[in-house]
Amino acid sequence: MERRTVLKKTLAYLFVIVTLVALYFPVYWLITMSLKVRIDIMSIPPRWLFTPTLANFSWLFNHYSLQNAVITSIIVALSATCISLALGIPCAFALSRFAIPRKKDIEFWIATTRMLPPVAVIIPFYFIWMSLRLLDTRTSLVITYLVINLPLIIWIMMGFFRALPRELEEAARVDGASRWGSFFKVTLPLALPGIGASSILSFIFNWNEFFFAFVLTTTNRTLPVEVASFMAVGLEVKYGEMAAAGVLASIPSLIFAILARKLIVTGFRGIAGFALK
């Protein structure tokens, strides 16, 4: 019996280690590639031991201006996330608390908008922004990302609001709080883990989005589009410089995730708990 328990624990640890290696090996490969010279990058078999260099980062700052792309990505990702939260949280609360005619149909319609492949809606978006003279602007990207990620936030927050006991809001109203007062003072603080999880998901999706930014912008490029453009610099694919740009591009998402890690962990536990109900 004891031997079987040890075997189960060993297999569990082995599974975790294999999973972590599979998840983080691409990250390790990206970081090491950004620190290699070209001859080490192209070496077959791969060189595991090499002399690290910051030449790729230096080339980026000396020959390529990423400032505009970084600023555009930050403005677009943060704006779309904040507006999505401002619209999505009240919508999710209304759908989870009030009796609304054809509520199931509305919820299903919201879910289906997230299932559409981007290529199915890119042409309407393109012509709408072109007719409004907003093509190749940050405004068009913010609204586009807002439309794409709003259903995700509504669905996540609906789960959290439905998991919260109504009795707490009713108790606050018995104590004299208004409907909005009970929402802001009782419900919203309890839903902070859900807000943290949905905001980090929305920010990461907005930050990494490539397809819409590639089609809808020419000069106001986001960072993923700017990094991909390195593949077309002359006849040489600049692998090291692309990896260095990839490392820099991942830093904001990493910082955001570290700052909100407690809310994210609690939030994903809440999502998992709601999904199992």
Image (cartoon, rainbow, N blue to C red):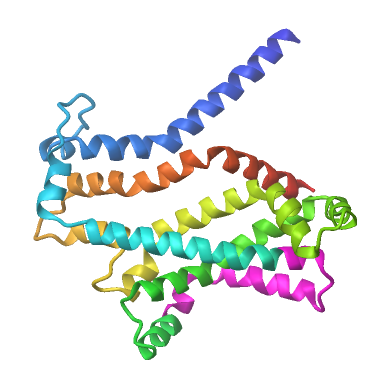
> Quick check: 130 left or right of 43?
right
111 is higher (above) or lower (below) than 34:
below
Q: How many marks?
A: 0
Figure quadrant of residue 129: bottom left
Pick whichever, 189 or 205, lies toward us. 189
Q: Is residue 193 left or right of residue 19?
A: right
Residue under the point 57% across and 67% down: 150
Residue 265 vs 230, above or below: the answer is above
Tell whether position 97 is magenta: yes
Q: Is residue 146 left or right of residue 274?
A: left
Where in the figure is residue 167, as x and y percent of width and height? 88, 52
Q: Is residue 41 left or right of residue 72?
A: left
Question: Which region shows up in magenta?
Answer: 93-122
Residue at the image position 69 percent from the left and 53 percent from the top: 188
Q: Is residue 126 magenta?
A: no
Q: Find residue 194 and report its horizontal and vertical position in percent.
A: 64, 50
Coordinates of residue 100 in the picture (x, y in percent): 81, 75
Is residue 4 or residue 112 the one in the foreground? Answer: 112
Farthest residue to the top: give it: 2
Q: Is residue 28 above or below residue 84?
A: above
Res 94 seen here: yes
Q: Tell me the quadrant of the picture where the N terminus can be found.
A: top right
Residue 230 percent across, percent down from the top left: 19, 57
Mainly helix, strand or loop, the magenta region?
Answer: helix
Q: Judge whether residue 149 can be spotted in this image.
A: no
